[in-house]
Image (cartoon, rainbow, N blue to C red):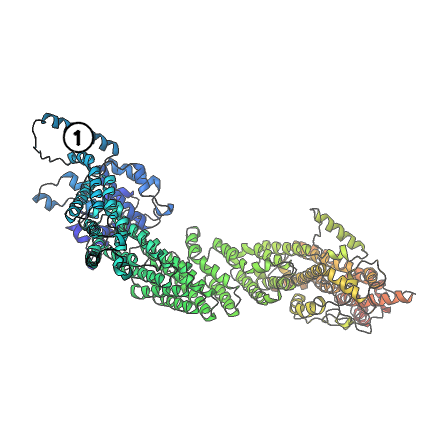
Amino acid sequence: MIGEYLGQHEEFPLAVMHSYVDSMKFSGLKFDAAIREFLKGFRLPGEAQKIDRIMEKFAERYCADNPGLFKNADTAYVLAYAVIMLNTDAHNPMVWPKMSKSDFVRMNTVSDAEECAPKELLEEIYDSIVKEEIKMKDDLHDASKTTKRPETEERGRLVNILNLALPRLKSASDTKAESEKIIKQTQALFKNQGQKKGVFYVAQQVELVRPMLEAVGWPLLATFSVTMEEGDSKPRVVSCMDGFRAGIHLTRVLGMDTMRYAFLTSLVRFTFLHAPKEMRSKNVEALRTLLGLADTDMDALQDTWNAVLECVSRLEYITSNPSISATVMMGSNQISRDSVVQSLKELAGKPAEQIFVNSVKLPSDSIVEFFTALCGVSAEELKQTPARVFSLQKLVEISYYNMARIRLVWARIWSVLAQHFIAAGSHHEEKVAMYAIDSLRQLGMKYLERAELNNFTFQSDILKPFVILMRNSHNSKIRGLIVDCIVQLIKSKVGSIKSGWRCVFMIFTAAADDEDESIVESAFENVEQVILEHFDQVVGDCFMDCVNCLIGFANNKCTPRISLKAIALLRICEDRLAEGFIPGGAVKPIDAVPEANFDVTEHYWFPMLTGLSDLTLDSRPEVRHCALEVLFDLLNERGHKFSSPFWESIFHRVLFPIFDHVRHAGRDGLSSGDDWLRDTSIHSLQLICNLFNTFYKEVSFMLPPLLSLLLECAKKTDQTVVSIALGALVHLIEVGGHQFSDGDWETLLKSIRDASYTTQPLELLNSLGFQKSNNQQLLSREAESDSHGSRGEVSISSNGEHSHPEPNPQTSLDNSEGSPSPSGRTQPAVSPRGQSIGQRIMGNMMDNLLVRSLTSKSKGRADDIAPPSPVKAPDDDEAVKAEEEDSPMMETVRSKCITQLLLLGAIDSIQKRYWSRLKATQQIAIMDILLSLLEFASSYNSPSNLRTRMHHIPPERPPLNLLRQELAGTTIYLDILHKSTVEQEERDSTEEADGFSVESGEQEKIKDLAEGKLVSFCGQILKEASDLQPSTGEAASADIHRVLDLRAPVIVKVLKGMCIMDAQIFKRHLKDFYPLITKLICCDQMDVRGVLGDLFSKQLTPLMP
């Protein structure tokens, strides 16, 4: 009674059963032990569907209590039935031969290893069941009133109820031995009773029939066949048909499969449906007999279903096609022909239909064979011209008839049906394909009426053919029909869909890639409705399919409107995920055991984050910007709960890939059509730096790879990429430098030093030729030693951008720093005090540097960079030709110069904002980097080298130079040295205001070092300037004037620096400075003489008595 009640399908008994099973605890129990415990409380009911509902719930509960043991509840469900069959097989003496351990393992093994139970578990279950039988609770009330059922009947009851097949046949050797024994006993009996004639003995033992049938069966078959072939006598035909029926029945009962198959195939052959012209009334009787067997003795057909169903298909074809019906019984009189055709039409009605109706009576193995055979016949019909759908229609009908079978059997049926419907739905005839898909929809609708418990996946299997057809179909009408079918399924069965959501989203994902806008629109409307109205249905693993679907729509190029709405829906999904609507997906605080939380969080969050990351490279600006905004808003909003390992994955797998197109740009960099990539990169680099600064405590360990990204981009030849990367570096320093630890500063300075070294334009030394001063000779030796694996103490030598001006001298240099005028004087220009050198460089780089100096290809550029051997400048045609040949090398030099100018900007940003918080060693490192930059530039710009290059270019054009870098580097270097040599009181007040302090011993060390560097640097520049005196020769004097014009901005910058030099330092070194200063009084550069006047008034006048 209890089992019968629990198995009912009504709402309340079903709820009682679910509550009863949920009250049980199977945690830690082995599978067979759990079944034993489960079946102790009640006796399983006597109806297959009731048992199926109970076993489904058991499988769900066991998987919930033992997560991870099985991939899904389907595996536990199938294994539960396998255990029941094994229990009956092992302990029912009527079953022989017994199932071996290998048979049991093989029966529960499928092609997908994840879908089946582990082999060790199966072997353990087998040993346990064989050793001890599972006994179900008896009904005590029935036991008190009735006698005990036979043991064999009791043991086989459950398998019989479920209509499951067990092997019952004896082995061939045992059967043969037994037959021989019976034949000998029969022969002995005949000999003993030989004197009696005409006496028959009745035997009750069925076993005695088998040897008799073996002896006469084949001759009887031959007799029946010859009679059917040679005569048309109706009494003889009827007798033959009785013989066929009896023979087929006896061979089935006795298990004589070979003889049964021979009788059946002979009977099928006599139907003559394959040759309607030769058909006679006797053939109609053969067909009638065959259809009768399908109604009364279906078990006898077994392995001949294919032939039987093929006969039914041919019968329908003949009777439904008048042209074929007219050929029946060709050559006979009209009355006979009409009679035969009428008989065929009668047989095509109810007798043929009864075959399909009676399919519900077939046992589990036979029904699978029946479906397989009918699919085979349908496949042949679809190959015909025109294609026929009779058997396809019958497949749908018998699917409805057999829908009530337990899921274990229906799963096997569907594995056959799914493949056939996929093939039919891919048919080349559109009408056939659409019919198959609509039939598939009908079956899906019908099956979704059955409730699915948690962790089961059969709904997904039911809808999977739609996924395959959607992905493979090239017909827009077919794809549109599939979308319409799924939409209808959702609207009518939205409350019943569980595991089916995965396939639904897969289909919509395929629709998102469609080129037909109507299909995209229809699919997206329903996805939007599902997320907004039925989000609680989209749980577990289906959530990621939902995210992938939305990403697919966001990537669709049909209309930006859908893409933007898809991104908005992604944000809604993220909110639901963070709020805990998806089990296991909510982010937890960092201190909540991140190791245990990380895998689940990553599992749910990364598809969304990586999808948004990919969308940042979309060619449509509105989509690209929206994706960037949502991605970084999401990270900024949720990042405080992310663990460090999670952040590391986000940077490496979500954020850094945004810049892959920049990092992997070729020699020519980004093309002119990739301006949108530049814009995105600039915006993204700013956002990633802001993100880093916002979550500095959580992501500080990511500084090295972040710097590596920025400086790797800075080494590219594309000038825009370089500007983007180092602009972001300056932004990172200015916004977040106050949070950097000492280790971070060490990492940053080392990265800048390495970048300045690797971007050193050695091509200027190797290809352009100039006389090397002592400093430059040292620099070259260091470069050589580094190329062999050892780097000198000052390992990073840097340069600035080489200026390549137009013939008009006013545009030869950056106009913000003063450029030579036609009169030989420079127009002084001082940077605004509120703007750092780095900001000024970054702000004007593209306008002043790229447009004016680098992107212009002026005539004679090859002369500027050619070796000094030719004295006479080539004509314009030769210059242009040489310029084209040297273009790749000049592009490399140009890019390196830009990089080093921008690196100077980064150094200036550091010294302007964070100088007081740096350690002494870090301050010294910055000085050394700047000094190495200046040594390279000043050596290349030395008067002797400038004069050498002037000899090979027209007088109206300035020589190739690095004056911009030298001027910027000089400004920053002097600022740093002045900061380091200020009086103790002034420094202490500044550091106190900033909240940082340096130990007094380190302060004195830095002050002494800076003083030495300052005096040495100023003295060297003054000495070079004082040596620029006019010579007696007119040509030499003109060269000196031109060099002085070029060098004047640097000289002026140094003299201005000396004006603000500490008075005590100037006084201590006056004897070194004074001779050099007095020589400059005669300089014809008005700017130099003007600043000399300021120097005299500020430094020398106070020293006079």
The quarter of the picture where the C terminus appears is bottom right
- Of 318 and 560, nearer the camera is 318
- Of 661 and 943, nearer the camera is 661
Q: Position of residue 431 (x, y in %)?
A: 35, 63
- Of 454 and 282, nearer the camera is 282
Q: Amino acid at mark 1?
A: Ile
Residue that numbered label 1 is attached to? 182
The quarter of the displayed image where residue 137 is located: top left
Q: Is residue 190 left or right of residue 615?
A: left
Could one spot residue 519 in this view of the protein?
A: yes
Q: Is residue 555 left or right of residue 780?
A: left
**Is 101 above or below relative to 729?**
above
The quarter of the displayed image where residue 537 is located: bottom left
The quarter of the displayed image where residue 223 is located: top left
Q: Position of residue 572 (x, y in %)?
A: 41, 66
Q: Position of residue 836 (x, y in %)?
A: 66, 67
Q: Position of residue 393 (x, y in %)?
A: 28, 59
Could one spot residue 961 in this view of the protein?
A: no
Total tally of numbered discs in the picture: 1
**Is 919 above or below relative to 485?**
above
Q: Residue at x 54, y 58 (%)?
A: 656
Q: Is residue 662 left or right of residue 73?
A: right
